[in-house]
Image (spheres, rainbow, N blue to C red):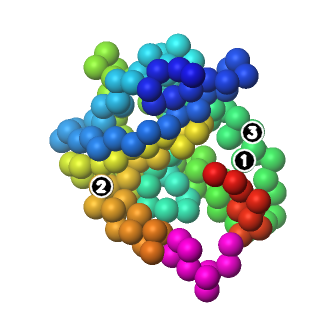
């Protein structure tokens, strides 16, 4: 087990976890929570890639080595399948390299802030190999909506979740 906010297993696999409410300054800079900074420095030399989440109005922030794995997976998708092509266009087309500055901040491009409706207050939470960044109010609305459908017998449980034991 590692420091609070992440753990490491099988040598190099890093898994981010945890939830934080933070602010974005007027220039669009977001301070990555302190508990993740050392790991990002060591594992990614402060290099990150931020892109839009093609499924929700949020952003995904990857350490560069993790993004390179995702890029390989995207490259393997067929351009002849419309959904695959759209996913590649959205994720790779909006992917932006960023660096943690000396104060642990990243600059989120205006286009990505606009897409995800990021303003002053945001939430960032670990999602294994990446972070997810949401407008705080949008996240609260989405979370309530998802929780209201949890356990709803009229919504079928996906096969991928049927054997999950928590």
- Screen quadrant of the N terminus: top right
Q: Is residue 36 left or right of residue 23?
A: right
Which of marks 3 and 2 precedes in the sequence? Answer: 3
Task: From the image, tell me which residue sits under label 3.
Answer: 72
Q: Secondary structure at mark 1?
A: helix
Residue sitting nearer the eye, 120 or 141: 141
Image coordinates for residue 100, horizontal then vertical, percent: 39, 23
Image coordinates for residue 35, horizontal then vertical, percent: 39, 24
Q: Secondary structure at mark 2?
A: helix
Task: From the image, tell me which residue sits under label 2.
Answer: 136
Q: Residue at x 30, y 48 (%)?
A: 122
Specify whether residue 153 is painted magenta: yes
Which of marks 2 and 1 precedes in the sequence? Answer: 1
Query: Is the Cβ of the residue at disc 3 closer than 8 Å to that at disc 1?
Result: yes
The magenta region covers 149-157
Query: Is the Cβ of the residue at disc 1 closer than 8 Å to that at disc 2?
Result: no
Q: Dot 3: within a 10 Å radius of its alpha carbon, few (fewer than 14), some, or many (20 or more) residues?
A: few
Q: Which mark is residue 138?
A: none
Q: CA distance from mark 3 to mark 1?
A: 5 Å
Q: Mark 2 against mark 3, which lies toward the viewer? A: 2
Q: Which mark is residue 74?
A: 1
Residue 62 visible in the displayed image: no
Q: Is residue 63 above or below residue 143?
A: above
């Amino acid at each position: 087990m590692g420091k609070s906010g992440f753990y490491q297993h099988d040598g190099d696999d890093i898994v981010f976890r945890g939830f934080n409410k933070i602010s974005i300054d007027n220039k669009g800079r977001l301070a990555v929570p302190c508990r993740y900074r050392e790991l990002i420095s060591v594992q990614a030399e402060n290099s990150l890639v931020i892109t839009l989440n093609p499924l929700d109005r949020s952003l995904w922030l990857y350490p560069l080595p993790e993004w390179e794995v995702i890029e390989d997976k995207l490259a393997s998708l067929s351009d002849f399948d419309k959904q695959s092509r759209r996913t590649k266009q959205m994720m790779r087309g909006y992917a932006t390299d960023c660096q943690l500055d000396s104060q642990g901040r990243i600059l989120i491009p205006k286009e990505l802030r606009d897409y995800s409706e990021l303003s002053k207050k945001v939430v960032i939470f670990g999602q294994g190999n990446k972070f997810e960044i949401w407008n705080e109010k949008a996240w609260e609305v989405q979370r309530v909506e998802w929780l209201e459908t949890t356990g709803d017998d009229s919504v079928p449980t996906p096969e991928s979740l049927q054997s999950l034991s928590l």
